[in-house]
Amino acid sequence: MEIMLVPINGGSRFEFPSLPAEVSVKNGSRYRSYSIIGLGNVKIPKGTDVESISWSSYFYGPSKRGEPMMGEYMDPKACVRILERFRDKGEPLRIMCSEIGINRDVTISSFTWTPYGAHGNVKYSIEFAQWKELKVRVTKNAVTTVTPNAAADTPEPRPEPAPAATYEIRSGDTLCKIARNKCGGEANWVKLYETNSAVIEAAAKKHGRKDSDRGHWIYPGTVLTLPT
């Protein structure tokens, strides 16, 4: 088993040369500790946000090189320098330990150490805080106008459509004549009739006719809507 730190923004990974006896994980308001030495099949529940991970352990001097408890050996002073650099820069890191289900983005929130014994050992304590990237969207040259007492959810008023053009029939008019003068050409009399068929037929019946014979009979005073 191994515990390693991988810089998220690129750089060399750091593998802890020796494992702590126990790792403490804080999930929300609860603390859980996982034994590393003699580890069975322990997993952190998936989907649970990890607020902090911490442990205390040792970096051992050269006398412990090659012992079963050690992974790839690294001088304790070199370990301290690397971890202090990560801490001081607030370096975003991925901490990984698959055997206990740790795979999180973190920063080092606390790292303290002290020389221990006469063989170059270092005793240390370390704590990691969960890290999430903060994304800020910036809109250039954006200007917001606030109107006092305006309801936030009131939609902007839509402009009223322009009133349709109309024409009042005069004595001597025909649909062809009106279409020629008002609708762009005599051929548009059909469109003029279809737009106003209801009022044209009503006027014809008012004057005693069965129908207008498709606009042949029209009467002064009838207001037509000119088609667009």
Image: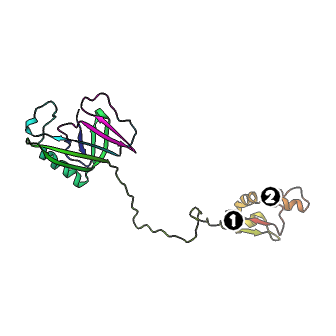
Residue at 70% x, 62% y is: 227
Q: From the image, tell me which residue sits under label 1.
A: 183
The color scheme shown is rainbow
**185 and 166: which one is in front?**
166
Quadrant that contains the C terminus = bottom right
> In the rendered image, is residue 2 in sight?
yes
Within 10 angstroms of label 2, few (less than 14), some, or many (20 or more) residues? few
Q: Position of residue 196 (x, y in %)?
A: 76, 60
Compared to residue 119, the image places residue 165 above or below, namely below
The image quarter in which residue 148 lies: bottom right
Amino acid at pointer 2: Ala
> In the rendered image, is residue 215 in sight?
no
Q: Position of residue 142 (x, y in %)?
A: 43, 66
- How much space separates mark 2 and mark 1, taking CA atoms? 19 Å
| In magenta segment, residue 40 | yes
Residue at 22% x, 37% y is: 20
Judged from this view, the residue extending furthest toward the front is 117
Q: SS at mark 1?
A: loop
Residue at 17% x, 41% y is: 58
| In magenta segment, residue 125 | no
Q: Which mark is residue 84?
A: none
Amino acid at pointer 1: Cys
Residue extent of the magenta highlight: 15-43
Q: Position of residue 41 (x, y in %)?
A: 31, 28
**191 and 102: which one is in front?**
102
Within 10 angstroms of label 1, few (less than 14), some, or many (20 or more) residues? some
Q: Which mark is residue 198?
A: 2
